[in-house]
Image (spheres, helix red, strand yellow):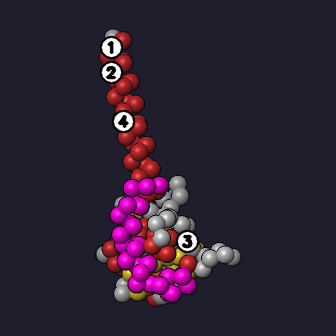
Amino acid sequence: MNVYKSIILGIALILASSLSIQAQDYKTQYNVDDSKIALAGYSPVSYVDLGLAQRGSKNFKSEHDGIAYYFTSADQKTSFDKNPGNYLPEFGGWCATGIGVGAKFRTDPNKFLVQDGKLYLFLYSMEVDALELWKNDEAKLKASANKNWKKLQSTH
């Protein structure tokens, strides 16, 4: 009986550790906290379709890859649900300039750029306006970001 308890306990510990690892994976892929709410609750459809930073509502919520997205209306939710790939932020919602220089930085939901149908978000602080840095050297930063993102997806 003790052997069986030990085996079951061992399996339970392995499963728990695996679940813990999977639970943390979203933090390497997406710029979210434990709430798993993307874009600090702002609507990705508002960014891409309207060029506006608008806070979404819990009443219009969808999940994609275990991450919650909020929208301003049922129509926005429907648009997202039909084709989430059109609205997902580049680089998991991390600062595009940061990814370009090889680091993950949190973003300001009001600092964004929609270009060629892609949503890029940026850090903004008293010291750094990462959107302006991006605009000053966009081609180089975008090329670096696309390379760096593959490596950074596996690091926290």
The residue to which callout 3 is attached is 107
Magenta-drawn segment: 132-156
Q: As shown in the figure, which amino acid type bears the numbered disc 1? A: Val
Q: Which numbered tag is attached to residue 84?
A: none
The residue to which callout 4 is attached is 15
- Which residue of the protein is positioned furthest toward the top in this rendering? 1
CB contact under 8 Å: marks 1 and 2: yes
- Chain-order first, disc 2 or disc 4: 2
**Vertical arrangement, residue 57 with respect to residue 27, above or below:** below
- Chain-order first, disc 3 or disc 2: 2
Q: Is residue 43 magenta?
A: no
Label 4 secondary element: helix
Q: How many marks?
A: 4
In the rendering, at what x and y percent does residue 59 appear? 50, 69
Task: Choose between 55 and 152: the one closer to the eye.
Answer: 152
Q: As shown in the figure, which amino acid type bears the numbered disc 4? A: Leu
Residue drawn at the location 39% of the way across and 48% of the way down:
22
- Chain-order first, disc 3 or disc 1: 1
Residue 86 appears left or right of 51 = left
